[in-house]
């Protein structure tokens, strides 16, 4: 029969391995640097103004007002304008393409980009 020290040693090794695994799993190394984030057009829900920002969250804070009024937008060829369409999560998981509320045509990511903020 093995000594108690063997059981204790084995338990400590397993605990240490588990701690390292969970530390790596939940560490901040999965945070993507800003320069690697995709640029996306956001539309201010109050003014309709379009902004080109790095895709971080939704809603995003308007750099001019400081209010969380920016949500992702898509372009309507008939309106010749960017339209607010909803959170990034919705765009990524939706089975259908958003449509323009005025013309009912599908919206696209292709349109004249606003000037990037510095």
Image (cartoon, grey):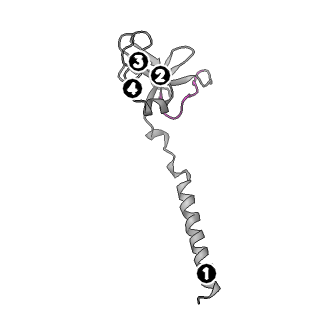
Q: Which of 96 and 43 is in front in this view?
A: 96
Whether pointer 4 and pointer 1 mark residues with C-beta atoms closer than 8 Å, the reply is no
Closest to the camera, between mark 1 and mark 2, is 1
Residue nearest the viewer, comparing 65 with 18: 18
Q: Name the residue under label 4.
A: 96
Q: How far apart are marks 2 and 4 (CA)?
A: 12 Å
Please report whichever mark, 1 or 2, sits nearer to the chain's N-terminal start: 1
The image's mark for residue 7 is 1
Q: Eyeballing the image, is 72 above or below 79?
A: below
In the displayed structure, does residue 85 sit left or right of residue 8?
A: left
Quick check: marks 4 and 3 in contact, CB under 8 Å?
Answer: no
Q: Rounded to the nearest whole Å, what is the CA distance between mark 3 and mark 2? A: 9 Å
Residue 58: image location, x then y, percent: 54, 30
Residue 85 marker: 2
Q: What stretch is highlighted in magenta?
A: 51-64
> Which residue does the image show at 55% across and 51% down from the upper left?
28
User: Residue at horizontal 58%, vertical 78%?
Assistant: 10
């Amino acid at each position: 029969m093995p000594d108690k020290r063997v059981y204790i040693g084995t338990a400590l090794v397993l605990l240490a391995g588990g701690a390292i695994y969970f530390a790596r799993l939940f560490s901040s190394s999965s945070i993507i640097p800003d320069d690697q984030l995709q640029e996306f057009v956001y539309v201010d829900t109050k003014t309709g103004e379009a902004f080109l920002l790095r895709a971080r969250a939704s809603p995003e804070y308007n750099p001019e007002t400081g209010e969380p009024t920016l949500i992702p937008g898509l372009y309507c060829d008939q309106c010749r304008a960017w339209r607010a369409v909803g959170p990034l999560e919705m765009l990524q998981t939706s089975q259908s393409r958003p449509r323009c509320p005025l013309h009912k045509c599908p919206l696209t990511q292709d349109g004249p980009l606003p000037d990037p903020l510095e």
